[in-house]
Image (cartoon, grey):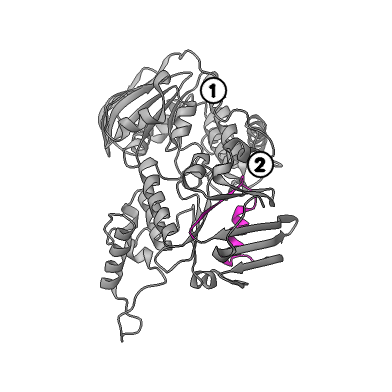
Amino acid sequence: MSISVNEENVILRLSGITKRFPGTLALDQVQLTCEKGKVHILLGENGAGKSTLVKIICGVYKRDEGTMWYDGREVHYTDVRQSMDAGISIIHQELNLLPERTIAQNIYLGNEPMVKGMKGVVDYKKMIRDSKELMESLGLNMNPNTLVKKLSIAQMQMVEVVKALSKEVKLVIMDEPTSSLTSREITKLFEIVERLKARGVAIIYISHRMDEIKRIGDHVTVMRDGKYIDTVSVPEVDLDTLISMMVGRRIEKMYERNYRQPGELVFETNNLCGYRFRNVNISVRSGEIVSLSGLIGAGRTEIAKAVFGDEPIEGGSYKLYGKEIRRTTPRKSVRNSMGLLPEDRKIEGLVLQMSIKENLTSASLGQVFKGGILRSAPEDAIGQKYVEKLKIATPNAEKLVGELSGGNQQKVVIGKWLETGCKFLIIDEPTRGIDIGAKSEIYHLLDQLVGEGYGILMISSELSEVVGISDRVYVMKDGEITGEVTRENLTQEAIMRCAVGGEGA
C-alpha cells in the first residue's frame, strides 16, 4: 500500500478477500482500508470486481477467503440487514425506489416509525416531519408528500441519498451517485459528502468520472480483473497514472475527434415548444456533434423526446433533411432517418432478457421477418456484423444483453439504430455508467460516425465530455436556449455562465 493510515481512525479493513463463482475467480486477494471522515475512491473498469467487493462488505455475498474487520472487530455478515444495523449504508447507481409512494414513504421503507402503544400503526406525521428535517439538514428542499414518480432522475438520486442516511451510519458506499446529475446537483451532493466527513462518517465512493476524484477523494484504490492493484493518495497522483493502472495500458487521448468542415443541414428547429421547453432554435449539420448542455430540469431530454415523437410538440416545428415536421411519432421519425438513444438504456433502449442479435434487429424487424415468420439467417448476419463493426466484447451475438458491460450495451443500442439506416442520431447521456476504457471507445465511435456523414445531437451532463467532443454547444436554462458556444470558445466556464443565467457566449 502506498499510503499511511491512522490505525485509531480505521473503520473498515479487508485483507485477502477472494470470491469464486462457477468458472470465475471474481476477486483474488483484494485488500481495502477505510478511515473515518475520509472519502476512499474505489476505481476500476466494469468487471474489475468493485460491485462484488461491495456486496461482500454489505453481506449480499459470502467471501471464500480473507478477513473483514469493521468498527474494531472481525465480522461475517450473511445478509444486508446485519450490515445496515451495524451502520453500513449503500447508495446504488440503479434507483431502488417505489414510484407510487411518497418521498417520505420511500425514505423510511421498512423502517417506518410507529405510533407509541399501537403496534403495527405507522406514525405518518412523524415520518413526514422527520423526512423534512433530514432533507433540510442536507440542504435539500423537497416536499416529503410528493410521489416519487413525479420527480426528476436527479431528485430521485437525492432521495436515494437521504434514504441511505435515514439511519445512523458509520460507513456509506456511494455507487456512481452522480451518473444522473449535472454540475449544480453534483455540487449539492459533494456538500452532503463534506457534512458526512465532518461527522466522522467513512465513505467508499465508486465513480468513472475522473474529474470527481480530485474534487472529492482522499485515497483511491485501483482494481483490475478482480485483483488489487494499488492504493494511493489522491493529491499525490495524476489522472493519467490512475487510468493506466485501471486499464493496464496508457490511453493517450481520451477525447478523440477529427474536426471536419460540416456538411448539409440535417436538423433545424423553428421556435419549438413542448413540455418544459419553449422557443427553441437549434441546428445540426452532417459531420458534426452538437451538444445540448445545462442543469438537470433545463428541458434537454424533453426536447429529444418531443422531436422523436415520444412527447407532444406544443408549438413551432422542425425540419429534418428539409422536410418540415409539426407532429410526429417514433415510427415516423425512424422512417425520416432519425434515431434516439435514450438516457436510460436499460429501461428504454434495450430488452435485457433478449440476445444481442435480437436487440440489434428490434428497430428494423422488417428485415428479419417475412410473412410473419422470423428468418434466422439475416438476424444472425446482422448480429455478427455489429459485433465485429462495433467491437462488442462477447463470444457471440447469442449472449443476453443484460450480461454485457455498460459500454457494450451502449454499442448495441447504437448498432440497433445504425441498422435502421438512420443518419441523424439524438444521443442522451452517451457514457452514463460506462467505465474509462469503454468511454474512449464510444468517443472514437461517435467521431467515426460523423466522419461518415452522420449528424449527432448529444445531451450530456458531463461537462468534460461536452467540451472534449463537441463541435458546438447550445446551453439551456429553465426550458430556453441561453447561449451557443462554438468550438473556438468552448470551455466548461463558458457553458456554466450560460447555464446559470450569466452572460452568454
Q: Which residue in the rendered view is the most extreme toward the bottom?
A: 117
Dividing the picture into quadrants, the one containing residue 475 is top left
Residue 13 as seen in the image, left or right of residue 90 = right
Q: Which quarter of the rendered picture does the C terminus lie within?
A: top left
Image coordinates of residue 368 in percent, x first then y, are: 59, 35
> Quadrant of residue 315 in the image?
top left
- Which label's residue is closer to the chain start, 2 or 1? 2
Which secondary structure lies at badge 2? Answer: helix
The percent position of residue 209, horizontal first and vertical second, equals: 51, 41
For label 1, count other residues whose C-alpha is less than 10 Å away and answer few (under 14), some (14-19) or many (20+): many
What is the CA distance from the residue labelled 2 to the residue labelled 1?
A: 24 Å
Whether the magenta-drawn stretch holds residue 45 is answered as: yes
Give above or below for 257 relative to 366: above
Q: Where is residue 312 in the image (x, y as percent from the top left)?
A: 30, 37
Which residue shows up at 40% across the image and 31% down it? Answer: 492
For badge 1, the amino acid type reads Arg
Magenta segment: 37-61
Q: Which mark is residue 257?
A: 1
Label 1's element? loop
In magenta segment, residue 42? yes
Residue at 56% from the left image edge and 25% from the top image edge: 256
Amino acid type of the residue tagged 2 in the rendering: Met
The residue tagged 2 is 245
Mark 2 against mark 1, which lies toward the viewer?
2
Q: Which of 51 and 119 is in front in this view?
A: 51
Residue pictured at 67% horizontal, 35% vertical: 377
Q: Which residue is drawn at 34% across and 38% down?
A: 302
Image quadrant in which you'd find residue 479:
top left
